[in-house]
Amino acid sequence: MANFSTILTLFFTVLTLSLSSPALAQDSGVLATKKDSLRGSITAERGWWDVVYYDLHVTIQPQDSSITGYNNITYRVTQEPTQMQVDLQDPLIIDQITQNGKSLDYNRVKNSYAYMVDMPDNLKKDSLYTLSVYYQGMPKVAENAPWDGGFVWAQDSLGNPWIATANQGLGASVWWPNKDHQSAEPDSMSINITVPNEIKNVSNGRLRDTTRHDNGMTTWSWFVSNPINNYNIAVNAGNYVNFKDTYNGKGGTLDLSYWVLEHNLEKAKEQFQQVKQMMQCFEEWFGPYPFYEDSFKLVETPHLGMEHQSAVAYGNKYKNGYKGTDLSGTGWGLKWDFIIIHEAAHEWWGNNITTNDVADMWIHEGFTSYAESIYTECRFGKEAAAEYSRGLRDRIENKNPMTGKYGLNNEGSGDMYYKGHNMLHMIRQIVDNDATWKSILRGIQKEFRHQIVTAGQIERYIIEQSGNDLDDVFDQYAHYADIPTFQYYIKNDVLFYRWEADIDHFDMPLKVTLTDGSYAFIYPSSDRWKRSNLSLSDTDSFKIDKNFYVKTDSLSSR
């Protein structure tokens, strides 16, 4: 038996390792560091206050790729205050934090982007206060925007400065201080960006004012009157020209505004005619555009594109498809401009309704990818849309779940796009009533308008409104890497079948084609073989509906 000193030494060694080593999140293989938790969870220092309003002021200097600025953060006290967590990423630094004209002490948490601010003692619950954060530096350069976030310092083909930001995933704190969590949406926001006189800045919402300064700089002041996610706030500065249009939609007259490089004006006028067709289709299927008060804008950018609310970034070079190619391989994806359709669909799926945790990002990307099929249906018919959806399946890997790990700023796998898309397309087949399905999509947008949601809320709404028990479907497709396998064999013209799945007692209806060409639903389960009473005299005619995204395993007679 070890002596006491040996046991004591072992205890402190284990304790030290447990405090210094990253934890393994949810037995998933994802290493959860303190930095991950500070970024991805509602910490105690975030939980006691709600953002109400941001008033952001940033001056941009293209000559040395630096920025200086401040953000006035108006917040409401909702619980007993502790320190306040404010986020700002390296290499930017905070110079000062004040409230009511008094400087506050703060310290940065080691190896993180989080600053902890010592707050005054007299804060009252339900009251509003404004904290001002002053900062400066050279922000992270985006090496491959929009996938790798930060600032883009580019030049257009004529040598003019062309600047943009894109920071979904990485976080808005890569260029301005804020409460950097996806659930923290202000009710409204003022965005004031100062750039050299020779370029114009376009940000979210509506242009309120431009102020020309004596130092060769101009401030462009924009205002967003709706709730907005911080990753949507954008700088777009370049040698822009602006042209406008209007769309008479379900919410009244919607202002359409387009900001493009001057030498691309004629191409833009031609390509952007797709916007009205898109708007008509999406309003029919999803309900009114969610931000009439802030207008709809497309802004040409040096990166491919991003769903920046009311200022959608466009960089598809005025081509149909995805950079001129069809992701589905069916030909239908070349009938329309992928960036216009996909990124604008995010105004409904991601901007109007936003998930509380990035782990549920399949709600944003799965529904938005599915919206591409909806647009195809509006233009070219239901079968064209189904072909487009099925054509995307080759891009699904089924190696990791499309749901990420909660509280860690973990988005899950890229299957959230095409697997989420095909899951929704399949659920439409299960619902088997297009009027009901359209009502469900509209209903989600209306029921959760301008709200922060969980995937569970959206799933439950679909289940309740459709009258279908889809719990197993959402669980298998969203939380496991693989899809279910339909196992079957036919003996003496009788069909025997079951599911093989990760979930115990997995149940999901399946549509099959019969000998006479008609279809019927069967109801396999993973816990036992079932026998069908369908007549299958011609076994070669038995087919599983191709709109169901499943594997099949035809077994020999047992």
Image (cartoon, rainbow, N blue to C red):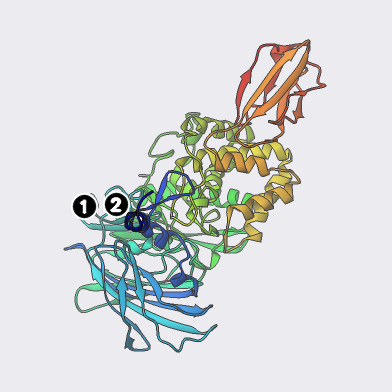
Query: Do we see residue 376 in this rendering?
Result: no
Q: Residue at x 31, y 77 (%)?
A: 106
Q: Residue at x 32, y 59 (%)?
A: 240
**Label 1 packing within 10 angstroms: few (<14), some (14-19), many (20+):** few
Q: Residue at x 66, y 36 (%)?
A: 504
* Image quarter of the C terminus: top right
Q: Is residue 136 above or below residue 90?
A: below
Kind of residue sitting beneath label 1:
Leu
Q: Image check: 224 left or right of 484?
A: left
Q: Is residue 441 above or below residue 323?
A: below
Res. 272 mark: none
Res. 263 mark: 2
Q: Residue at x 20, y 79 (%)?
A: 214
Q: Is residue 224 above or below residue 361?
A: below
C-alpha gap between disc 2 and disc 1: 9 Å
Q: Image check: 95 left or right of 1?
A: left
Viewer-proximal residue among 454 and 291: 454
- Which mark's residue is nearer the viewer, 2 or 1? 1
Asked if disc 2 and disc 1 are in contact, CB closer than 8 Å, the reply is: yes
In percent of width and height, residue 109 lies at: 32, 67
In percent of width and height, residue 455 lies at: 58, 52
In percent of width and height, residue 388 lies at: 54, 33
Kind of residue sitting beneath label 2:
His
Query: Do we see residue 188 in this rendering?
Result: yes
User: Quadrant of residue 165 in the image?
Assistant: bottom left
In percent of width and height, residue 342 lies at: 48, 47
Which residue corresponds to mark 1? 158
Q: Secondary structure at mark 1?
A: loop
